[in-house]
Amino acid sequence: MKNEKKTDMERQISFDSLPPNIRENMTEEEKQLFLHAEEWPESLFEKLDEFIVKD
């Protein structure tokens, strides 16, 4: 997957703050989705559920 969008600094900071074991278990596609996607697939929400603050 080619990275054509500039990474949002807030997303990058959020990604970097994830525990190493979570980051290491993400696929390249999931990492790109985390950093760039307007909408995440349900599978990514499930993987990151304990880190998502719900309104």
Image (tube, rainbow, N blue to C red):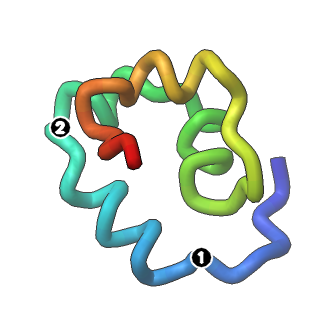
Does residue 52 appear to the left or right of 19 in the view shown?
right
Q: How many labels, in total?
A: 2
Relative image position of residue 28 (x, y in whole percent)? 60, 36
Q: Residues within 10 Å of mark 2 (few under 14, many from 20)?
A: few
Judged from the image, the secondary structure of the residue bearing numbered disc 2 is: helix
The image quadrant of residue 36 is: bottom right
Q: Which residue is mark 1?
A: 7
Contact, mark 1 vs mark 2 (Cβ under 8 Å): no
In the figure, 14 relative to 9: above or below?
above
User: Relative to residue 45, is residue 38 depicted above or below?
Assistant: below
Give the alpha-carbon distance from disc 1 to disc 2, as whole Å: 20 Å
Q: Residue 29: x, y in percent?
A: 67, 35
- Residue 15 shown left or right of residue 7 in the figure: left
Sooner in the amino-acid sequence: mark 1 or mark 2 = 1
Judged left or right of residue 22, residue 19 is: left
Q: Amino acid at mark 1?
A: Thr
The amino acid at mark 2 is Pro
Q: Residue furthest front?
A: 55
Q: Residue at coordinates 59% horizontally, 76% vertically from top-left?
A: 7
Q: Position of residue 18 (x, y in %)?
A: 23, 46
**Residue drawn at x 56%, y 49% as measured from the top left:** 34
Give the residue drawn at x 41%, y 77%: 10
Report the disc number at residue 20.
2
* Residue at image location 35% in from the left, 55% down from the top: 15
Q: Is residue 10 above or below residue 17?
A: below
